[in-house]
Amino acid sequence: MKLNCDMGESFGLWKLGEDEAVMPYLDMANIACGMHASDPMVMKKTIELANQYGVTIGAHPGYPDLQGFGRRTIQMTAAELESYFVYQLGALDGLCRSESTRVQYVKPHGALYNTMMKDDAVMCSLLKALSRFNPQLPLVVMAVPEREHYLELASGYGVELLFEAFVDRVYADDGRLTPRTMQGSSHTSIETITSQAIQLIENQSVTSISGKTLPVIADTLCIHGDGALARQIATVIRSQLECV
């Protein structure tokens, strides 16, 4: 089980997240590509930081929505979506090449991530674009009950999937995340987050908002680097993963 985190989401003079504090505990860094957050200098610095700690770099593309931090769905044609997606992958990979490294996987951000998990047309657009850009790059998707459905979609484009679960988000009874617009959609105590992480690691399950135990088969666990407890969460989960 790998630990991943969304990184490099500052922009100009605006700083977000504790990248320097969290990076040493990660296996995978999902680096923003300039559309929902970040800029070339932030991307470069985050790549350098990941290289320093031997952390695998993934592209974290989103909708072109700096004002909304990529959390608003933008209606786009398939051709537009594919172009914006590839544009972001190329931007980050170009900077990675300049630092003697490469993008190793792709994880969409925010509304784009949520939309692809609800809309097969969007999922297929991203799979198609990724297969044309580099079919060797795995796509990170949510570990949901419909696992086989998404594996079948991805196999049609020759793309590998990595399934992820969330240690700091509240799960609905259908095995998906509760919407961020709902009060209490994220866990705020280190005790609850640690408990959910241990359950995911040891039992491959989570407890839903109504108390149901749901199976969750995941390859990687996600934490959010912009949270107040990011460093503490990363430290605790790293220690739990090393005990497995």
Image (spheres, helix red, strand yellow):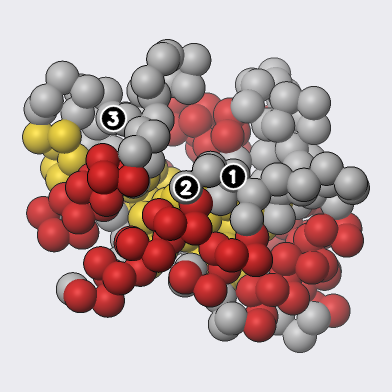
Q: In the image shown, does 124 or 137 lie closer to the viewer? A: 137
Mark 3 vs 2: CB contact within 8 A: no
Query: Residue at position x 55%, y 63% from top?
Result: 22
Instruction: Name the residue furthest top.
Output: 182
Query: Residue at position x 11%, y 25% from top?
Result: 211
Residue 29, image x and y in percent? 57, 63
Instruction: Tell me the distance, in whole angstroms, between the alpha carbons under discs 1 and 2.
Output: 9 Å
Earlier residue among tags 3 and 1: 3
| Amino acid type for the residue under numbered disc 2 | Leu
Q: Residues within 10 Å of mark 2 (few under 14, many from 20)?
A: some
| Amino acid type for the residue under numbered disc 1 | Asp
* Residue 229 badge: 2
Residue 226, image x and y in percent? 59, 44
For residue 196, above or below residue 220: above
Tag 3 residue:
171
| Amino acid type for the residue under numbered disc 3 | Tyr
For residue 30, above or below residue 243: above
Residue 230, image x and y in percent? 49, 51
